[in-house]
Every structure is written in structure tokens, then in C-alpha cells.
């Protein structure tokens, strides 16, 4: 897809790539009520987004660099798969408000669940951790299993939020 500057009402198509600079963020709103904030200095791809009101619903995204926040809508109630792929891990989503990205940890990706039901974090080593309580976070480094989730201190959550706040 192309790099896009979004405008309200613009249609999001399969494989659209959203690129932001160091000072701007973009909010993507989907028909089911899901919202994704593409953070500062970020490249984010909407690979697939299908709502057929059945179990074949699919929401697949890719984070190339930077950070994002996702507040899921109705799709996770019936989605077959709702995932954000990164170079270090795949984030599987089950109805939640969470944030993830590069930059908080040099060489790694951070994932924190702000509120919701859960986020699975799986990497190439086949290890999976689950964030299933508000404020739980993990870090994934290259060639390492995701770290055991811990409750993040308010300052660390605030740093994560800052990456996706204008």
C-alpha cells in the first residue's frame, strides 16, 4: 500500500500503510467501533480487515516501526483472528485497550494492556505470555521469549501512552 495522510471519512483499504512523522499521530476508526491510534514516527499497515458478522472475521495489522494503541470494537467478539504483527512478536487481541511499540526499550518491543480481556504476545521461539489484567506489560527482545508480564508502574505506562499521544 501507499503511505497515506488521512482525512476524516477516508476509506481504509487492504494493505494501506500509515506513516506519521515525529510530531503527529493518526487515528483510524473502523466500522465495528475499533479505533487505532498510529503513534509518532510510526509505520503501520492495515493488512486485512473483514467483518462478515460471523466467525470468519479477520483483523490483521503490522507495525513496522514506532508505536500504536488499539481499542477494539465488536470485531473481537466474533473475530477468528485479531493480530498485530511486528518483527519481534505477534500480538493477539481479545477485546481490549492496549498499546505496543518500539522505542521504550532499545532493541525491543513493549506491550501493555490498559484495560480489557487480554492480549497474547507470541514470538518466533513459540513462547506465549498473556496480559490479562489492567496495567500488565511485557517486553520482547530479539531471539528471547517474551518477558514474564508484570504490573507496570504509572510512569512506564505514561511513557508508553506518550508515544501515541499528540
Image: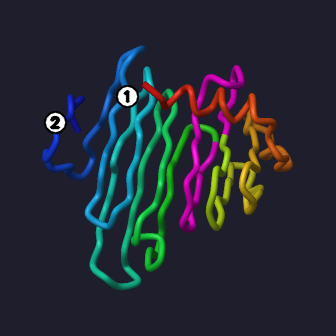
State the residue position of label 1.
Answer: 25
Image coords of residue 137 (percent x, y):
74, 45
* Residue 103 as seen in the image, left or right of residue 148: left
Image coords of residue 89 (percent x, y):
63, 46
Residue at the front extreme? 154
Callout 2: SS: loop
Do labels 2 and 1 touch, CB within 8 Å? no
Report the predominant secondary structure element of the magenta stretch: strand
Say which residue appears at 58% left-offset and 60% top-offset.
92
Say which residue appears at 47% left-offset and 70% top-offset.
76
* Residue 98 as seen in the image, left or right of residue 59: right
Say which residue appears at 15% left-offset and 50% top-offset.
11
Residue range of the region highlighted in magenta in the rendering: 89-110
Residue at the bottom extreme? 54
- Between 7 and 146, the one lying in front of the other is 7
* Residue 34 as seen in the image, left or right of residue 10: right
State the residue position of label 2.
Answer: 7
Does 94 lie within the magenta span?
Answer: yes
Residue at the top extreme? 22
Does 98 lie within the magenta span?
Answer: yes
Image coords of residue 78 (percent x, y):
44, 79
Specify how the rendered protein is coloured.
rainbow
- Between 43 and 1, the one lying in front of the other is 43
Alpha-carbon neighbours of circle 2 within 10 Å: few (<14), some, or many (≥20)?
few
Q: Quadrant of the N terminus?
A: top left
Q: Which quarter of the figure has residue 31?
A: bottom left
- Between 83 and 143, the one lying in front of the other is 83
* Residue 129 as seen in the image, left or right of residue 54: right
Mark 2 and mark 1: span between their CA atoms?
12 Å
Callout 1: SS: loop
Amino acid at each position: 500500500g501507499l503511505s497515506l495522510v488521512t482525512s476524516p471519512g477516508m476509506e481504509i483499504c487492504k494493505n494501506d500503510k500509515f506513516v506519521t512523522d515525529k510530531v503527529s499521530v493518526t487515528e483510524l476508526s473502523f466500522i465495528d467501533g475499533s479505533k487505532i491510534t498510529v503513534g509518532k514516527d510510526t509505520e503501520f499497515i492495515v493488512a486485512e480487515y473483514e467483518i462478515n458478522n460471523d466467525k470468519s472475521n479477520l483483523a490483521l495489522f503490522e507495525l513496522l516501526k514506532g508505536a500504536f494503541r488499539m481499542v477494539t470494537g465488536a470485531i473481537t467478539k466474533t473475530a477468528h483472528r485479531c493480530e498485530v504483527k511486528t518483527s519481534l512478536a505477534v500480538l493477539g487481541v481479545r477485546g481490549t485497550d492496549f498499546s505496543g511499540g518500539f522505542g521504550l526499550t532499545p532493541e525491543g518491543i513493549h506491550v501493555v494492556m490498559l484495560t480489557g480481556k487480554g492480549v497474547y504476545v507470541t514470538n518466533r521461539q513459540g513462547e506465549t505470555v498473556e496480559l490479562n489484567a489492567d496495567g500488565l506489560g511485557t517486553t520482547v527482545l530479539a531471539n528471547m521469549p517474551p518477558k514474564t508480564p508484570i504490573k507496570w508502574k504509572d510512569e512506564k505506562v505514561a511513557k508508553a501512552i506518550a508515544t501515541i499521544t499528540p
